[in-house]
Image (spheres, grey):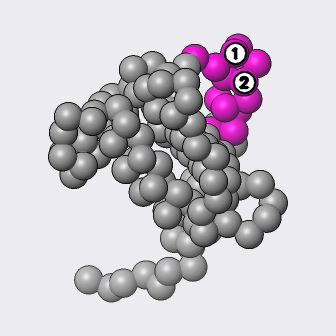
Amino acid sequence: MQTGERWALWWNAREVAAVIPDGRPGVRLWMKGQKMWQTKDVRAASVRQGKRFAERWCAARLYPELPLREAVARLVETAAHVQAPPLPPKERQQVRRLADAGGRDIARIKEALDARRPQQAH
């Protein structure tokens, strides 16, 4: 799940991994397994590398009985169906306003581009 620049992996309605930019080169990667002591906080070169590492590390701990490839597939599949926790009313309003403003901007840009295109004769 992507929220701004932060990417999070959810499993059973709880966040098990997060990839967060922290102002330094690369990203910070935080992961949590089933047990309290199975927590890892490392750095990754990019968000893509962080996502892949998080999926594999968490899958190996959450589905230890499965082969890694199958565990990652199951984790990613179940994570895709999990909804993010609901936003507070103020943040929902901000999201709605940004979406409305973005939609108007895109429509205005499309109109400007259409006006620049030469008309084709049939």
The majority secondary structure of the magenta stretch comes to helix
Task: Classify 10 Å Cα crowding around label 2: few (below 14), some (14-19), many (20 and above).
Answer: few
- The residue tagged with tag 1: helix, strand or loop? loop
Task: Classify 10 Å Cα crowding around label 1: few (below 14), some (14-19), many (20 and above).
Answer: few
The answer to whether residue 84 is seen in the rendering is no
Of 110 and 41, the residue lying toward us:
41
Is residue 60 depicted above or below 93 in this figure? below
Q: Tell me where the magenta segment starts and ends, as one range.
A: 86-99
Q: What is the residue that sits farthest to the top in this orientation?
A: 89
**Image coordinates for residue 63, horizontal then vertical, percent:** 28, 34
Name the kind of residue labelled 2 in the image: Glu
Q: Does the magenta stretch include residue 92?
A: yes
Q: Is residue 38 magenta?
A: no
113 on left or right of 27: left
Residue matched to label 1: 88
Of 64 and 106, the residue lying toward us:
64
- Tell me the tag on residue 91: 2
